[in-house]
Amino acid sequence: MRCGVCGSDRLSPVGELTTEALAPNFLHFKFPRPRLFRARPTFVAQFARACRDCGTLFPCLGDYERKLLDDSVDGLA
């Protein structure tokens, strides 16, 4: 895997993506509403990798969130 910004192959291992607050505040990956009065499809990125050369952060979905995304990908277009 390479950094999409600088092209380096020096990426960190996957780590947990969280804040210092008492309640976890993860990044949300949201898509437009599929229809009126329907909830926006949202997926939580709980993990990340960082480029060791330029510092770019790459959020990652966990196994459960990745499965939800895979199951609903046809309705997101």
Image (spheres, grey):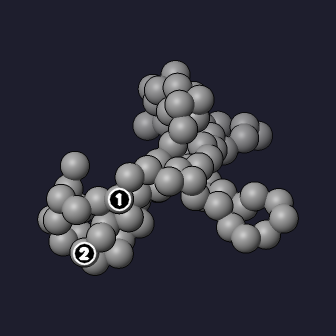
| Residue 53 - label | 2
Measured along the vertical axis of the image, is residue 5 above or below residue 29? below
Measured along the vertical axis of the image, is residue 55 above or below residue 25? below
Q: Mark 2 and mark 1: span between their CA atoms?
A: 10 Å
Q: Percent from the top left, x then y, of residue 30?
A: 58, 50
Q: Percent from the top left, x then y, of residue 34?
A: 60, 37
Residue drawn at point x = 47 percent, y = 26 percent: 70
SS of the residue at dot 1? Answer: loop
- Lower position in the chain sequence, tag 2 or tag 1: 1
Measured along the vertical axis of the image, is residue 76 above or below residue 27? above
Residue that protrudes farthest toward the front in the picture: 13
Residue drawn at point x = 60 percent, y = 43 percent: 43
Q: Which residue is mark 1?
A: 12
The image quadrant that residue 9 belongs to is bottom left
**Front one among 14 and 7:** 14
Q: Percent from the top left, x then y, of residue 8?
A: 17, 65
Q: Percent from the top left, x then y, of residue 45?
A: 56, 50
Residue that protrudes farthest toward the top in the picture: 71
